[in-house]
Amino acid sequence: MAQLLTDAEIQAKASRLSGWTVEGSKLQTTRKFKDFIAAIEFVNKLVEPAESSGHHPDIEISYNKVIITLTTHDAGGLTQKDFEVAEIISQIS
């Protein structure tokens, strides 16, 4: 099982991620697109990196808005894996 990060580690890592916030034991970002089709195209781009890393985000879609939430469920909070996947997602447009 992955090791939980300390609050200090979480804050340090979060400060290096643009557009992401720490919400309790979760890391979250919201992306807005021109329409539903563009939002779905973005979500489809998340499949390969999620599968490759073996770490899958929680995804909420509301028309042109996509909310991505990361947490390591089996560890009960944030781990290094969440921040690694967040960095990958941050590079996807």
Image (cartoon, rainbow, N blue to C red):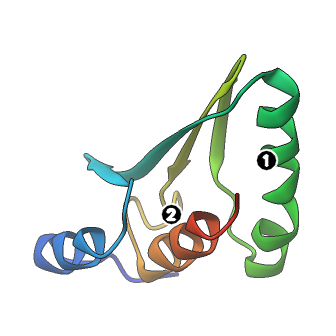
Q: Which mark is residue 6?
A: none
Quadrant location of residue 33? top right
Horizontal placement of 35 versus 16: left or right?
right
Let me know if residue 52 appears in the view.
Answer: yes
Q: CA distance from mark 1 to mark 2?
A: 22 Å
Give the image location of residue 1, x and y in percent: 52, 81
Of 19 and 59, the residue lying toward us: 19
Instruction: Report the residue that reaches farthest toward the left.
Output: 8
Q: Quadrant of the C terminus?
A: bottom right
Q: Amino acid at mark 2?
A: Thr
The residue at the point 66 percent across, 39 percent down is: 59
Give the image location of residue 12, x and y in percent: 19, 78
85 w.r.t. 20: above or below:
below
Residue on which the image places disc 1: 42
Circle 2 residues within 10 Å: few <14, some 14–19, many ≥20: many
19 w.r.t. 78: above or below:
above
Give the image location of residue 19, x and y in percent: 39, 54
